[in-house]
Image (tube, rainbow, N blue to C red):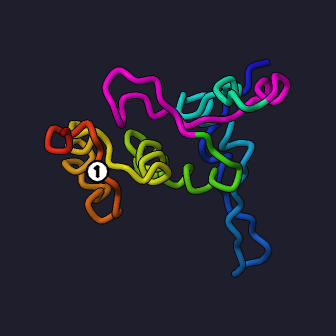
Amino acid sequence: MKTKIKSKHVCWFMEYNDSEKEMVFEEEQALAFLLSTDVLFLNTHWYKKDWNEEQQSLFCVLVNCNDVFYWGSADAEEIKSDDMNTLWNYYCKDKIWGPAIWCIKQRGMMPQKPVYDDIMEKGTWNLDKMKLEPNPSWPENKK
């Protein structure tokens, strides 16, 4: 049996009567959908050198931000369940750059210059108003 996850299963409205509706956010559906679209991926905590082997083997969920901050880098930000709704909203607003914006805000740092230019040109997000730290990869920030 094949299951297809659709975005309409993530957010929907519960109708209580003719005038009252409540938006329902299904975190598990969002997780499944974003995993299926490669926005999220699973890994372990292998990089936590101060953790014991059992702790390191625990799964974690990460937001893919490869090449957002530096070219040729495998990069990600770990996400907590409390942040899933925000990530989902960013994804819905902009399927291309929304997850990157979530990572940019989490890290508090500008993306690399070509990514900055693409995001700003699209006009959905204004990185200059986010009070982000400079990215050291920008030519003007290199010493």
Q: Residue at x 68, y 30 (%)?
A: 48
Image location (x, y in percent) of residue 97: 38, 43
Furthest residue toward right = 54
Q: What residue is shown with label 1? A: 134
Q: Residue at x 42, y 28 (%)?
A: 66
Q: Residue at x 28, y 50 (%)?
A: 134
Q: Quadrant of the N terminus?
A: top right
Image location (x, y in percent) of residue 57: 79, 23
Q: Is residue 70 magenta?
A: yes
Which quadrant of the view contains residue 113? Answer: top left
Q: Residue at x 32, y 48 (%)?
A: 110
Q: Is residue 113 left or right of residue 95?
A: left
Relative to 42, say whether 124 is above or below: below
Which quadrant of the view contains residue 131? Answer: bottom left
Q: Quadrant of the C terminus?
A: top left
Relative to 142, say whether 133 is above or below: below
Image location (x, y in percent) of residue 130: 35, 62
Image location (x, y in percent) of residue 45: 70, 28
Q: Is residue 98 magenta?
A: no
Which quadrant of the view contains residue 53? Answer: top right
Q: Is residue 33 left or right of residue 14?
A: left
Q: Magenta residues?
A: 52-77
Q: Nearer the viewer, residue 123 or 51?
A: 51
- Crowdedness of circle 1 by 10 Å Cα count: few (<14), some, many (20+)? some
Q: Name the secondary structure under disc 1.
A: loop
Furthest residue toward bottom = 19
Q: Is residue 19 left or right of residue 55?
A: left
How many numbered badges does the structure rendering display? 1
Residue type indicated by callout 1: Pro
